[in-house]
Image: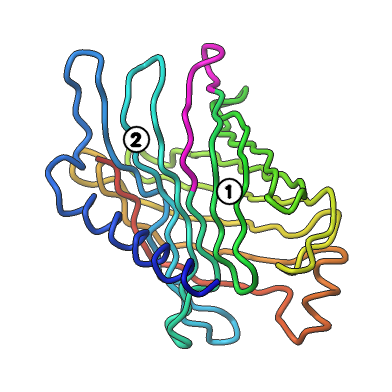
Amino acid sequence: MNKIKLPVQALSVAVLGLLFLSPSSWAQEKGLFFYGLQMEELEYRRGDEKENLFNWNGDAFVGTDEIKLRWLGEAEYDRGASKFESLENRLVLQMPISTFFDAKGGVRLDTPKGTDRWYGVLGITGLAPQWFEVDADLFFSEAGEASARLDVEYELLITNRLILTPSADINVAFSDDTEIGIKAGLTSVEAGLRLSYDLIDRAVSPYLGLVYERKLGNTADLADGEGEDIEGWRAVIGTRIVF
């Protein structure tokens, strides 16, 4: 298991570094060919129990209007303990299915505290009525377990550049996977509120905010029995980057 975790963690950090440093990471248009990078969250979090965390959530893409290849990654790194609390990488193909929505499918690899997990991924992403950004995914693990995730975000313009962004991330499991601390039912929710200001042609948007995390149902009971925190508030400072 450790032989898998360390290279994946190193690869994820290396990919981020290369994307930031390489000129090819800047979004470009050459005919119908596009490539670029978007980091929705690149932030430091300070918890109510003095947790010292670094988080990222972003993606890189290459392709055309008809089909593109996307890498999506997110992680939580505990700076106090010098280890990843979670690390997820997805590689998917994405194509339009309507004016406002795309379908996507691919694979996901998680390296959590317990056993590593591979998943198949099917999902949709796009704009719902009233301009809510929606990302919904179904996951099917190598262990035969199924789960789902719904991400919803809305940008409220206070001025042309000052933006308040509420968000919600809801996870549900359709069966138990106790090796990674998951029980069937609603497993966790994360709600955030970030106030950002667009700079440099809107490519960089520093922000401040608050995040609330909570484990739910039987998953919370399992975590509580193992002495883990099941909820917490986080003050966040970070930036959104789009190239």
Residue drawn where x is 69% and y is 49% of the image: 141
**Dot 2 lies on which element?**
strand
Say few, some or many: other residues with alpha carbon within 10 Å of mark 1 (under 14 / 14 to 19 / 20 or more): some
Residue drawn where x is 47% and y is 48% of the image: 164
State which quadrant residue 23 falls in: top left
> In front of the other: label 2 or label 1?
2
In front here: 179 or 164? 179
Say few, some or many: other residues with alpha carbon within 10 Å of mark 2 (under 14 / 14 to 19 / 20 or more): many
Does 231 sit left or right of 121 as displayed? right
Q: Main secondary structure of the magenta part?
A: strand
Tell me the kind of residue under disc 2.
Phe
Residue drawn where x is 64% and y is 68% of the image: 115
**Dot 1 lies on which element?**
strand
Image quarter hosting the N terminus: bottom right
Does 195 sit left or right of 210 as displayed? left
For disc 1, the marked residue is 167
Q: Position of residue 240 (x, y in %)?
A: 35, 51
For disc 2, the marked residue is 61
Q: Position of residue 26 (x, y in %)?
A: 19, 39
Q: Position of residue 185 (x, y in %)?
A: 85, 54
Q: Which residues are magenta?
A: 90-102
How was this image coloured? rainbow
Q: Position of residue 34 (x, y in %)?
A: 26, 25
